[in-house]
Image (cartoon, coloured by chain):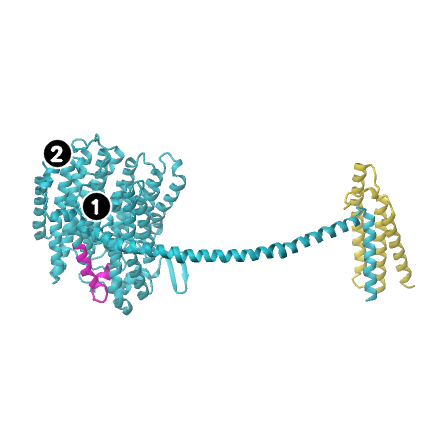
Chain colours: A cyan, B yellow
Amino acid sequence: MIRFGTLMHQLVLAAEDTGHAAEDGHHAIEPGITSGALVEWAWLIVIVPLVAAFVIAFFGKKLPFKGWEIAFGSIAFVGVYGTVLFLLNATQGIVYEGTVAIADIGDFHLEWGWMVDGLSIMMYFLVGVVGTLVFMYALGYMKGDVRFTWFFVSFSLFAGGMLVLVSSPNLIQLIVGWELVGVASYLLIGHYWEDYANVDAANKAFMVNKVADAALFMGAIIMAVSVGSFSFNHILEVVVHGENGALSQWAFWAGLLIFIGAMGKSAQFPLHVWLPDAMAGPTPVSALMHAATMVTAGVYLLGRLFPFYLDVDGLFAGDVRNIIIVIGGLTLFLTGFIAIVQDDIKKVLAYSTVSQLGYMVAAMGAGAYTAGLFHLFTHAFFKALLFLGAGSVIHAVHSNNMSDMGGLRKKMPITFWTFILGTLALVGIFPFAGFFSKDEILASIKYAGGHGQDVANFILILGIAGAFITALYMTRAVALTFFGEYKGKAHPHESPKSMAYPLIGLAFFAVTAGWVNMPGIYTGFTDWLATRVPLTGIGDHHAESFDWALIVIVTPLALLAIAIGWWMYGKDKDTQAERDTFRIPVLWPLLENKYYIDDFYMSGIVRPIMGPLARVVLWIDMNIVDGVVNGVGALMKVFSKGVATVDTNVVDGVFNATGAGTGASGSALRRSFTGRVQQYAAFSFVGVIVIAVLFIIF
Amino acid sequence: MTIIQFLLVGAALFSFGLYGVITRRNAVLVLASVELMLAAVNINLVTFDVVLQDALHAGQMFSLFIIALAAAEVGIGIAIVLMIFRNRQSADVDELDLMKG
């Protein structure tokens, strides 16, 4: 049963009524499309990659491309469908929620559904387009891999899980997608499980996420119990009308716990530790995981519940926003620093991702829905580009370490130029994508600070410093990889076309993706994201024009960082030695040990719990569990001996006696069966006579 | 006239038939004896129909059914006997003891 709830219409109407009261009510697009085949069949976006995963698992190996074609076809379908929805949303606006009832438990209705609104459509578009390019790239990158087919099973499941997550109209389905993404990432990070370190990385990612997930579950339960529904629309309806006592009482805890869940997936300090280790997976996985899938889930969830956190009336989770902005600010600053000292090019990019996610989360904390998601949008393209470029280099030199690279500029021109474009976009140089989104985030944090929040002012300084750090570590990565002299042993060459074309495609987006939201010139992206229910409940701050003061500070800072980076690492005669001369005594060891957070977790939490816990569990296992099992076994032995006696004597006796009796009576009676029909006729006549006589007598 | 004469005729016919069925060796004669028994039943039915003055004449209807049934039974019976004779060159009932236990 598919129904387009009347609730939707009510909510649209309700939102329109209250719209004028919103904080700085921007003009939302009137949703032009609220029904029709295009949105009603949008569930295909979710189902196709999941079905593809199963089809590849069973039939993939028999196909000419060993299952790649199915994976690619399914993700390309998502890309095309997502693009169509994206364009239609941009021109007409789409708001739709389809649901299928799965189970009714009393008053509780469990539904599976698919949201087709501005936020979800942006995610469909991102997952589909970035996914298509990454899947195309993966064909070349994974060529000759032992578990090629299985890789694409997990990869399709990964994309499908993310689509389940972003299409979800309620917290339950979101958690299902959340866990699907988690398990698929576990499979992909541990893809090369022959190396024990990779298994550790996969376990770490899974465990750290699980810690956060536990908080998410608790938050979702608090939310659902106080609202009486898992549905986002119901929750946000309550928030927009600002009238629910139960929710407002528990809002802080619900908001905080859900944010901790988001911290896990979006790798926020101090739960970021899994993401750099997740580099153990194949590079296409890193590209997709860091761009469109997985790490964006937390930011997406904050965006989905944005009115709950924005909390205009101060009834709900507004206090959590201060925590969010601080966590985001710390993340963007602290993890960016670590990237400076990493030798593994993928780890540089990984810490960069964590840092950029910090920007997004800080923007959410500053109450800037559009800015946070805008950076998510642009970051997806240039970070996927940078990862694929790094993968292309790794593919060529057979090493992750920048100390084995250098001077690849001439040998790999396509990779080099696209990598440069991605770097400029990430650093935030005009007119590349990152410039617009980072500027908007900083402007929104400044705006939040302008309302008297000292915290936000502090975070603004961290954000500006973060831009400097970003430029520094990216310049270092580019210099060590592409300039100077080649230091490795393999013979690098440009990657095959299937790997080069996705780089060019992503480079196009890395340059242009920011142009959809230029304050004061064209702000289409703001409107696209605002096509939601409740429409004007979003009410975020977004800049009306460029913040020149910030640009004047940030852009020269970034250029200065590039200059410093070039001065430090660009010459590359004896890079390793030269880099050592720049070691700052206390800071560098601190950074190289990642602030000792991993060590703290390991020796502070994991081992103290693991050691005694293991001993206790062993004792329980040896004494109690084994005792119970042995006792039950002995008891069963005695019991079964008794049963055996009864069985051999009584039961067998009955059956044997029955058999013997039947046999004896049979051989006695067989004599009367002479085969003579007339004798039978005579017997039956006698029988009739006897019956007749008995009738007469009685 | 009482019904006793009719019932006696019926009983006599039935007894002859029964005697024939049990004693005859030739299968054709056994079949003929079965016909006698059916005829005896018919006489009984018609007799009681007349005596009891049944408005629906159920007795006569049943005797008509039995006549039709007897004709069909003879047809099948004779066919079976012919097949047996063709296969075994004999229609002796005593030799047909394949069903002996």
Crowd tier of the residue under label 1, counting other residues whose Cα lies within 10 Å: few below 14, some 14–19, many 20 or above? many
Question: Which residue sits furthest top?
Answer: A491
- Disc 1 element: helix
Q: A208 or A170, which lies in front?
A: A208
A578 vs A519, nearest the viewer: A578
Q: Main secondary structure of the magenta part?
A: helix
Q: Residue furthest bottom?
A: A245
Residue A448 in the image, given as x and y percentages of width and height = 14, 59
Can you identify the residue that label 1 sits on?
Answer: A350
Marked residue chain, label 1: A
Q: Are marks 1 and 2 on the same chain?
A: yes
**What residue is at 79 percent from the left and 48 percent from the top?**
A671
x, y percent for residue A260: 25, 57
At label 1, which amino acid type do we have? Ala
Magenta stretch encompasses residue A312: yes
Q: Are marks 1 and 2 in contact (CB under 8 Å)?
A: no
- Is residue A94 something that shows in the picture? no
Dot label at residue A493: none
Q: Which residue is mark 2?
A: A484
Would you place residue A195 above or below residue A10 in this image? above
Q: Which residues are magenta?
A: A306-329
Q: Is residue B41 above or below residue A143?
A: below
Q: Earlier in the sequence, mark 1 or mark 2?
A: 1
Q: Secondary structure at mark 2?
A: loop
